[in-house]
Amino acid sequence: MMIEKGFPPYAMHKGEHDRALEEMRRIFQEWQKTMDSSVLKIYLIEIVPLWLTNHIASMDTVTARFFDTGFSPSKVAH
């Protein structure tokens, strides 16, 4: 949807999702090797909620504003 609507910071937004997914894969692989549940516990209780909160408050808010108004931060006059 971001591509179809011409969302200017699409690559940055997608890159952040890609980075988070890669981190998730890495944590899962580490857990598979060690079977240390504390690795998953820390990730799921501390890291994921913090990332989601920050991502929603920043990138997703900007994205929603763009879809609602058609304006991105790069088009807004300061």
Image: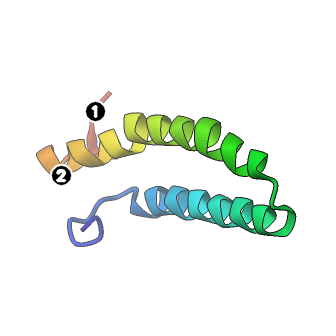
* x and y percentages locating residue 44 in the rendered image: 60, 45
**For residue 58, which numbered disc appears in the image?**
none
The residue where tag 1 is placed is: 77
Crowding at label 1, few (<14), some or many (≥20) Cα neighbours within 10 Å?
A: few
Question: Is residue 30 at all visible to an observer of this figure?
Answer: yes
Residue at 86 percent of width and 62 percent of height: 34
Count of numbered tags: 2
Position of the N terminus, as image quadrant, is bottom left
Residue at 28 percent of width and 64 percent of height: 2
Q: Is residue 75 left or right of residue 19?
A: left
Q: Mark 1: which amino acid?
A: Ala
Query: Relative to 42, is 28 above or below?
Result: below
**For residue 67, which numbered disc appears in the image?**
2
Query: Relative to 31, is 75 above or below?
Result: above
**Res 7 quadrant in image:** bottom left
Q: Residue furthest top?
A: 78
The secondary element bearing badge 1 is classed as loop
- Whether pointer 2 and pointer 1 mark residues with C-beta atoms closer than 8 Å, the reply is no
Residue at 29 percent of width and 70 percent of height: 3
User: Distance between the Cα atoms at labels 2 and 1?
Assistant: 18 Å
Question: Is residue 73 at all visible to an observer of this figure?
Answer: no
Query: Relative to 67, is 52 above or below?
Result: above
